[in-house]
Amino acid sequence: MHAISIDIETFSSNDLNKCGVYQYVQAPDFDILLFGYAVDSGAVKVVDLTAGEEIPEEVLAALSDERVTKWAFNSNFERICLSEWIRRKHPEYFISYGIPEDTVGDYLNPHGWKCSMIWSAYMGLPLSLAGAGAALGWTSRN
């Protein structure tokens, strides 16, 4: 596995627009509902965590592996959410970075994460996923 594209759907009682991603994930009821991914530009797969489905072990391991490039639209959101979720649900796959006294140790290392929203902005496309998709002629049917 060289690269993985990721999109997640989440829930939290903390309002993301009012508190930001770091407090959003700290709510006791924070959870990831759906985990969509594609490995090495392969077929898109969606794991419905609410239905008891499990993210494959090799994918969980890849999320902490600096050698695997992780792509997401607004990748910081995915990285912070996945950091909290993995620490809670699969601590055996969580690898932090930094020193123990530093709060960055609570999160997955940003090395290896790439943000398609930033690339989109660089190309002059809208900063929203829906806007960028519309500008590129993509619909939910593509």
Image (spheres, rainbow, N blue to C red):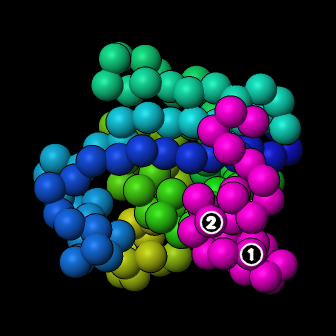
Residue placed farthest to the top in the image? Answer: 52
Q: Nearer the viewer, residue 104 or 129?
A: 129
Question: Badge 2: few (under 14), some or many (20 or more) residues near its Cα, within 10 Å?
Answer: few
33 left or right, relative to 121? left
Residue visible at 52% across and 60% down in the picture: 79
Eyeballing the image, is 130 above or below 141? Answer: below
Q: Is residue 132 magenta?
A: yes
Q: Nearer the viewer, residue 101 or 121?
A: 121
Query: Which segment is the magenta one?
Result: 113-142
Q: Earlier in the sequence, mark 1 or mark 2?
A: 1
Image quadrant occupied by the C terminus: top right
- x%, y% of residue 70? 70, 54
The amino acid on which the numbered mark 2 sits, given as a three-letter code, is Gly
Q: Could you give the CA–CA distance between mark 1 and mark 2, rounded to whole angstroms?
A: 8 Å
- x%, y% of residue 101? 36, 81
Q: Quadrant of residue 38?
A: top right
Residue visible at 56% across and 46% down in the picture: 7
Q: Quadrant of residue 139?
A: top right
Q: Which residue is mark 2?
A: 131
**Residue 113 in view, yes or no:** no
Q: Nearer the viewer, residue 100 or 106?
A: 106
Image quadrant occupied by the N terminus: top right
Query: What label sits on residue 125 in the rendered view?
Result: 1
SS under mark 2: helix
